[in-house]
Amino acid sequence: MPKKKTKKSISAKDARRKKARMSAMQRARTGRTHFPIDFGPMSPDGMNPQALSEHLPLAPAHTHVDPSDGSNNELPRSPARTWLEMSRAGGGEEALEVVERWPFRLVRAGRTVSPNKGWSCLRLLALGTKENMRSLCDGLIELEDASLQTWDPRTNAYVLAKDVPETSHMSRAEALV
């Protein structure tokens, strides 16, 4: 006589199937325009997705690679320095927006960049810290000048120095001081 299935075993099996289906759907959706975004600097209060979309980084596949010939696009200087230089030179709003939304990662020195690590941009950082773009760029340049971070144009990453204190365990107010 076969053992009677319990409700618990059926629900656990259904949960495994649902999880497998969800991960398969996620893998299928992942393409050149889908990439992990770092919402770390964002405040926990809810935000309208439509309003948030104009602050998100552009897709790395569209900014770092020229679709016409497949060559790599690089920012030789950091996005903050590039933005300030373009702003002082009277660059157009569209060009400034590309630099504001240029995707980069924050990486600690000596570590490799994980493909699952989220992308950020100047606009997302400004929104999360509630600063205007000029003061945010000035602050990032101060960190570069103090050798606490450097810009790596090959990987599009701000590389934090090894001796920069870890702030993940701190409260938001402590980390920003």
Image (cartoon, rainbow, N blue to C red):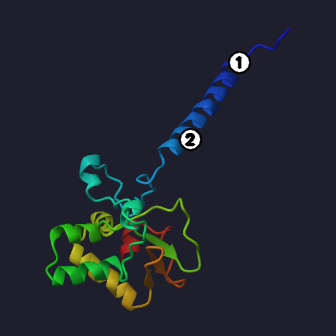
Image quarter in which the N terminus is found: top right
Q: Is residue 57 above or below residue 26?
A: below
Outermost residue to the right: 1
Expressed as whole percent of the image width and height from the top left, the position of residue 57 reads 34, 61
Q: Residue at x 53, y 59 (%)?
A: 116
Outermost residue to the top: 1
- Direction from residue 21 to residue 170 in the image, left or right: left
Q: Is residue 13 above or below residue 105?
A: above
Q: Residue at x 36, y 74 (%)?
A: 176
Secondary element type, mark 1: loop
Label count reads 2
- Direction from residue 42 to residue 112 in the image, left or right: right
Whether residue 101 is visible, yes or no, is yes
Q: Amino acid at mark 1?
A: Thr
Q: Which residue is mark 1?
A: 6
Image quarter in which the C terminus is found: bottom left
Q: Which residue is mark 2?
A: 23
Expressed as whole percent of the image width and height from the top left, the position of residue 140 reads 34, 80
Whether residue 40 is visible, yes or no, is no
Outermost residue to the bottom: 146
Expressed as whole percent of the image width and height from the top left, the position of residue 96 reads 22, 71
Q: Is residue 8 above or below residue 95?
A: above
Q: Residue at x 53, y 85 (%)?
A: 163
Q: Nearer the viewer, residue 47 or 58?
A: 58
Q: Residue at x 43, y 52 (%)?
A: 34
Mark 2 vs mark 1: give the one in front: 2
When asked about the image quadrant of residue 145, the answer is bottom left
Expressed as whole percent of the image width and height from the top left, the position of residue 162 reads 54, 83
